Image (cartoon, helix red, strand yellow):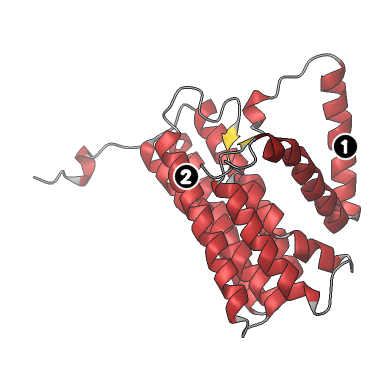
Amino acid sequence: MSLEPQDREKLPFLFLLPNLVTLAGMCLGLTSIRFAMVGKFEMAATLLLISAAIDGLDGLIARRLKATSEFGAELDSLSDFLCFGVAPGVLVYRFAMGEGNALGWVFVLIYAASACLRLARFNVTRGEDGAGKTHFTGVPAPAGAILALLPVFMAFEGWLSGPLMPIVSALWLGVVGMLMISRLHTFSPKSLKLRGIGVVGMLLGTVMVMGLIVTKLWLFLIVVDLLYVGVLLPEIWRVRGRILR
C-alpha cells in the first residue's frame, strides 16, 4: 500500500546537501565532456579539476552533518565513474588523438574500465575497519583523472606536441588505469596529522598553492602529477612483481 504524500517522511534540507554537492560535481564532469567535444579543451580540463575538488567535499559534509547513507555512497560512486572514468578519457582522446585513432580508443576503454573496477572494489571494501583511513588501495579515481590528464597539461605548457602526442597519451592512459586497479598503498588525506610547524607550513603552503593556481595552473598541475608519481615509485618498487595481485 502506498503512502499518501502527507504521510511520507520529510527530509531536512541539510540531509540532502551532500547529495546536491555530488550532483553538482557530476554536472561539471558531464559538461566537461561537452566542452571537449566542441574543442574547448582548457575549459573542459578546468571543469574536471573543479569536479575533483568538489568530490572531496560531499563525503566530508555528509560526515559532519551525520547525513551519510547508502544512497549517497552509491550516487557518489556513479558520479565518480562519469567524472573521473569517462570524462578524462574523452578529453584525452579528443585533444591528443583526434577522432579516427582506433588504437588510442582501446586505451581509453582500458582506462575507463579500470576506473570502474577501482570504484567497484572501493564500494565492496568501504565497510571494512580502517578502509581508507590509513591508505587507499590503488590510485583513487579523482587522483587517477588528474594523472591521466598529464599529457594534456604538458601540451598546454608547450612541452608535448607532434607525432608523439597520441602515442604518449594512449600509453599513459593505460599506465594510469593499471595504477588505479593495482594493490599499491597510496596516500589517504585521512591519515594526515599536523601539529606545530606542520600547521604553519600547511597554511603558508595553501597561500602558495592558490597563487600558483591563478598564475601558472597547468605548470602547477604538472608538478603535482610528477610529485605524485615520485611518491608512488618506492611503493611500486616494494611490491614489484605482485602489483596487480
Is residue 141 visible in the rendered image? The answer is no
Earlier sequence position, callout 2 versus callout 1: 2
Q: Secondary structure at mark 2?
A: helix
Q: For the point 47% across and 40% down, which residue is it?
A: 122
Q: Amino acid at mark 2?
A: Asn
**x, y percentage for residue 185?**
62, 34
> In the current view of this chain or complex, which residue is farthest to the top?
196
Observer-nearest of 126 and 38: 126
> CB atoms at circles 2 and 1 under 8 Å apart?
no
Instruction: Say if 94 sits above or below 180 in the image.
Output: below
User: Can you tell which mark lies on residue 207?
Assistant: 1
Q: For the point 84% across and 67% down, which residue is it?
A: 156
Q: Secondary structure at mark 1?
A: helix
The residue under label 2 is 19
Instruction: Say if 169 sits above or below 191 in the image.
Output: below
User: Can you tell which mark lies on residue 17?
Assistant: none
Q: Amino acid at mark 1?
A: Val
> In the current view of this chain or complex, which residue is farthest to the bottom?
100
